[in-house]
Each structure stands twice: as structure tokens, then as C-alpha cells.
Image (spheres, rainbow, N blue to C red):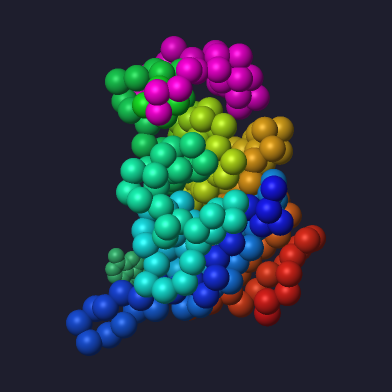
Amino acid sequence: MKEYIVETRSLKKYYQMGENTVKALDGVDFRVKDQEFVAIIGKSGSGKSTLLHMLGGLDVPTEGEVLIEGKCLLGLKKEQLAIFRRRKIGFIFQNYNLVPDLNVYENVILPVELDGRKVDVEYVDGILELLGLSEKREALPGTLSGGQQQRAAIARALASKPAIILADEPTGNLDSVTSHDVLGLLKMAAKQFSQTLILITHDRDIAQLADRIVHIEDGKIVGDTGKGSDSYA
Ligand SMILES: Nc1ncnc2c1ncn2[C@@H]1O[C@H](COP(=O)(O)OP(=O)(O)OP(=O)(O)O)[C@@H](O)[C@H]1O
């Protein structure tokens, strides 16, 4: 295993808006160790989502590199990138993106099935149990509370056993008590299944759950605190 599971080198993403260049990311050197939990904080428009999208291979940098387990994403062909995303990365977004016609269990195993892999039923049952969803396996998403839907989305992200979980404001639609509960469960699950967790949040209380807090401003890392951090600021 490489020292860093995730690494960016001088990562830049510029958008040309007429005469103006928006520097969404402006030279980001970001490193995450295997099984670390890192929270990314920063004001709206500071570049958090852009960074997360680059890490997950959902977008291509203007300059610089993203390395996952030491492998440069830019070197991958389209098909290889799609396989990489399905196998290595679990995404959790603010709007849960559950399929309304499928029940909780079917939603959770969908990415594994789409990848043509055999479902590890015992493992999935363990995740549902851990997230308090065992009773809701057969329920349709529309009949669940926001917190339950988000837990189902977390279960789905965990089910394919990805090495890395990327979560973009996963509790943005939940009240603060539910947010804390859901995030606590996500943290516990990531630990239990030896996953690396990178989470964007506006909420400083939630960020405190992480091993490290990385602060982004105007597309640059301006602070990096917590155990195991390198010093950037
Ligand atoms: N497709 C795009 N075209 C043009 N500009 C973009 C695009 N995507 C992002 N930006 C700009 O890049 C900057 C960073 O955006 P980003 O979404 O990464 O911020 P953020 O920190 O995630 O914000 P929020 O907390 O509001 O989600 C912003 O100025 C945004 O307007």
C-alpha cells in the first residue's frame, strides 16, 4: 500500500466565463492516508465540490494530477475510469438519489449488480444492521424519513466495498440532531469496513468528527488541522 491513498499534485480547475477566468481550484496539494477521515470545509464557492469531483474522476483537471493508490487518473481510458469509479469509490450526495421504485435492499445492492458482481448478502445485511435499516429492507424510499433515506444512500455507498467514500454535504437536508446521528454512523461504518472517508461539510460541529479538517478558500488549501496532518497553512 502506498503512503497516501489519495493525492493531488498542483491541481487546478479553471472555468472560462466570458472574459473572466474562475479559478475553482488553484494549485491544490492534498494528501489522504489510507483509512483516514478528512473533512473539507470552506465557504460556498470555495472549490470543495470541484475538488471532490476531481478525486472521484467525475471531472478532469485543467492542470495537475489526481493519484489514487499511487495511480494517476488522467492515464485511464474512459472505460477504465468508469470501472475505477464503480469499484474504488462510493459517492454520497446531499439528495440521496435513491431509485423510487426499488426498495431499500434493492437500492443498496444496485451498484454491485450493475457492476456484474455477486452480492455479498451477509456483508450487506451487516451494513443494514449497523445503519439501523434491517426493519426497512422492503420499504420504498418514498415511505422513509430523510434520515432513513440518507442512511440507505450511505448503505448503498458502502455495499460495493469501495476503498474510498466521497461525501458531498450528505446531511445538508437533515436537521442537526439527525445529521449528527447519520454522520456518526457513517464514521463508524467507514472505520469498521476499513474505508477512507472524505467529507464536505458546512457544519463545523460535524467537521470535528473527522481525524483532520482541511479548509479551502478561493480554490486553495488555507488550513489543515488535526492528528496526522501535514502543515499547509
Ligand atoms: N461548471 C462550472 N462552470 C463555471 N463555473 C463553475 C462550474 N462549476 C463550479 N464553478 C465555479 O467554481 C467555483 C467553485 O465551485 P464549487 O462548486 O467547487 O464550490 P463549493 O465550495 O463546493 O460551493 P458550495 O458549498 O456552494 O457547494 C465557484 O465559483 C463556482 O461558481
Residue 223 in which image quadrant: bottom right
- Residue 113 magenta: no
- Confirm whether residue 107 shows in the render: no
Quadrant including the C terminus: bottom right
Give the image location of residue 123, x and y in percent.
Answer: 61, 20
Vertical comparison of 77 with 112: above or below: below
Q: Decide: is 53 above or below 196.
A: below
Residue 29 falls left or right of residue 219: right
Residue 194, given in percent of the width and then of the height, sits at 69, 37
Q: Residue at x 42, y 60 (%)?
A: 74
Image check: 61 left or right of 137? left
User: Which residue appears at 37% of the width and 72% of the height?
Assistant: 62
Residue at image coords 47%, 78%:
26
Q: Is residue 132 left or right of residue 137?
A: right
In which quarter of the view is residue 185 placed? Answer: top right
Asked if 57 appears above or below 23 in the picture, the reply is above
Residue 54, compared with residue 112, is above or below; it is below
Instruction: Specify the segment rendered in magenta.
Output: 115-142
Identify which residue, 189 or 230, lies in the foreground.
230
Q: Say which of 167 and 111 sits in front.
A: 111
- Is residue 211 or residue 81 the one in the foreground? 81
Quadrant housing residue 178 = top right
List x then y, in percent, for residue 44: 44, 68
